[in-house]
């Protein structure tokens, strides 16, 4: 019995030692987890993370082509015009119809729906003042000229500029005159006329004398400049990622309470092997450039040439930076003056910003993908482009990158895709 008792004591002591050992080991683990809770990043990674913070977003750059860019009165008028459905052929479409404030100033549709059906997705407007080229193909070089395009587009607002001038005269005369001067006399002019309208409107426009056409066009241009002044006030909001990065860079111990472990893993994929940050960089998560990534065309019989079309259109644009309607001096229009043809433009589309991306389905320039999971699978599969050459496809890639370096294939596992998807929710 005594021997059994000694064995019991020995076992009890052993259990106690094991318990103490486990407790100490658990304490070490807890300490390590607490230290790891800071989500250690290399100095290189921290430098990359720092560039993604919204606090790094500078003031909206000056647009020399719009003298009313910073005018509060212009922004107030522009906001009224932005929401006014009278500026459309059917009286039911406003800028806000496709750029709804409730859905991040986009519409959640695969393609735009105005008085007709468009061919591309409506882009979100938040942060649009930070880019040189507007629309998916970059066919406009200022926010004010971008605002004008849909107004006369037959499937968007479908209106005409002479009718718009009369609407300004009827409903916004005082606000307009205080900003831009006296409205022109429109008496004796046709009911509807525009160089971009239907055949009857185009014929009526040609019958007007040059001075009247110019006067009406200037009212139209000033509408765009007022709308742009309003759109420039649309800024993105802070996300959990911004708070997380601030804590990481300040050495805060409690980063784990901001992003979940899976979201952090996704962030590592995003700036690492996923190569997402190559194009989705900076505080707005976009390089503001154009890339062919082999996105399948909405219409397989007529694939969209993207930026290739946009370059030709912006050069010929009646309202570009070097036009007589621009407030800029020619030497201030460097991007347009030195715009070059580039083989990379074929089938290339604008890199969209990713802030708030999880609630902006469907995705790509014509809503080809219903979910972010589909988008990620596309980048991993890297299909051959229907038009031009994809930067992602090994067989097409060659030396497609402008820096002369072909992008290596994206090789991330199903788990890493899931982690990346979780991270995108944090934006």
Image (tube, rainbow, N blue to C red):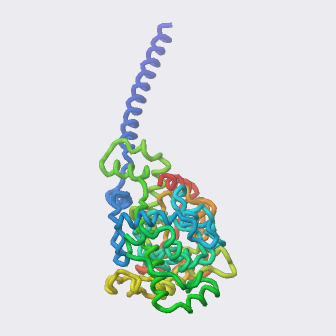
Q: Relative to 97, is 30 on the left or the right? A: left
Q: Relative to 185, is 202 on the left or the right? A: right
- For the view shown, which residue lies furthest in the right direction? 301
Q: Nearer the viewer, residue 376 or 137?
A: 137
Horizontal and vertical percent for residue 295?
Answer: 59, 72
| Residue 398 visible in the picture | no
Residue at position x 38%, y 87% from top?
337
Horizontal and vertical percent for residue 34?
Answer: 37, 39
| Residue 279 visible in the picture | yes
Residue at position x 62%, y 73% from top?
89
Total marks in image: 0
**Eyeballing the image, is 33 above or below 396?**
above
Q: Relative to 413, is 174 on the left or the right? A: left
- For the view shown, which residue lies furthest in the left direction? 250
Q: Nearer the viewer, residue 394 or 49?
A: 49
Horizontal and vertical percent for residue 281?
Answer: 42, 65
Q: Nearer the viewer, residue 397 or 376?
A: 376
Horizontal and vertical percent for residue 224?
Answer: 46, 74
- For the view shown, which residue lies furthest in the top direction? 1
**Eyeballing the image, is 27 above or below 291?**
above
Residue at position x 38%, y 49% from top?
243
């Amino acid at each position: 019995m005594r021997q059994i008792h000694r064995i019991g004591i020995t076992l009890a002591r052993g259990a106690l030692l094991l318990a103490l050992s486990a407790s100490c080991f658990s304490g070490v683990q807890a300490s390590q987890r607490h230290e790891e809770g800071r989500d250690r990043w290399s100095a290189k990674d921290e430098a990359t993370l720092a560039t993604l913070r919204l606090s790094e977003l500078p003031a909206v750059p000056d647009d020399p082509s719009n003298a009313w860019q910073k005018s509060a009165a212009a922004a107030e008028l522009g906001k009224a015009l932005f929401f006014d459905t009278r500026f459309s052929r059917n009286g039911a479409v406003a800028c806000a119809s496709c750029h709804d404030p409730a859905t991040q100033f986009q519409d959640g549709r695969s393609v735009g729906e105005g008085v007709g059906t468009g061919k591309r997705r409506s882009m979100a407007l938040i942060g649009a003042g930070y880019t040189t080229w507007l629309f998916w193909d970059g066919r406009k070089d200022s926010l004010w000229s971008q605002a004008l395009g849909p107004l006369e587009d037959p499937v968007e607002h479908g209106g005409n500029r002479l009718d718009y001038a009369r609407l300004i005269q009827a409903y916004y005369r005082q606000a307009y005159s205080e900003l831009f001067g006296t409205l022109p006399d429109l008496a004796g002019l046709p009911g509807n006329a525009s160089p971009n309208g239907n055949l009857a409107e185009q014929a009526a426009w040609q019958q007007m004398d040059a001075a009247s056409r110019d006067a009406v066009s200037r009212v139209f241009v000033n509408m765009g400049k007022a709308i742009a002044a309003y759109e420039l006030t649309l800024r993105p909001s802070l996300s959990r990622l911004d708070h997380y990065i601030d804590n990481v860079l300040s050495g805060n111990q409690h980063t784990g309470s901001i992003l979940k472990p899976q979201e952090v893993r996704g962030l590592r994929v995003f700036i690492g092997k996923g190569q997402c940050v190559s194009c989705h960089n900076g505080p707005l998560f976009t390089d503001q450039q154009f890339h062919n990534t082999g996105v399948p065309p909405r219409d397989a019989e007529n694939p969209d040439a993207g930026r290739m079309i946009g370059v030709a259109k912006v050069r010929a644009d009646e309202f570009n930076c070097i036009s007589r309607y621009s407030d800029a001096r020619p030497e201030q229009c460097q991007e347009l003056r030195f715009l070059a043809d580039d083989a990379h433009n074929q089938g290339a589309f604008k890199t969209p910003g990713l802030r708030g991306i999880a609630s902006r389905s469907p995705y790509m320039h014509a809503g080809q993908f219903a979910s972010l999971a589909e988008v990620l699978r596309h980048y991993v599969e890297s299909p051959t482009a229907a038009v031009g050459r994809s930067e992602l496809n090994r067989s097409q890639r060659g030396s497609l990158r402008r820096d002369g370096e072909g992008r290596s294939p994206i090789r991330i596992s199903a788990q890493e895709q899931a982690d990346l998807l979780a991270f995108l929710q944090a934006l």
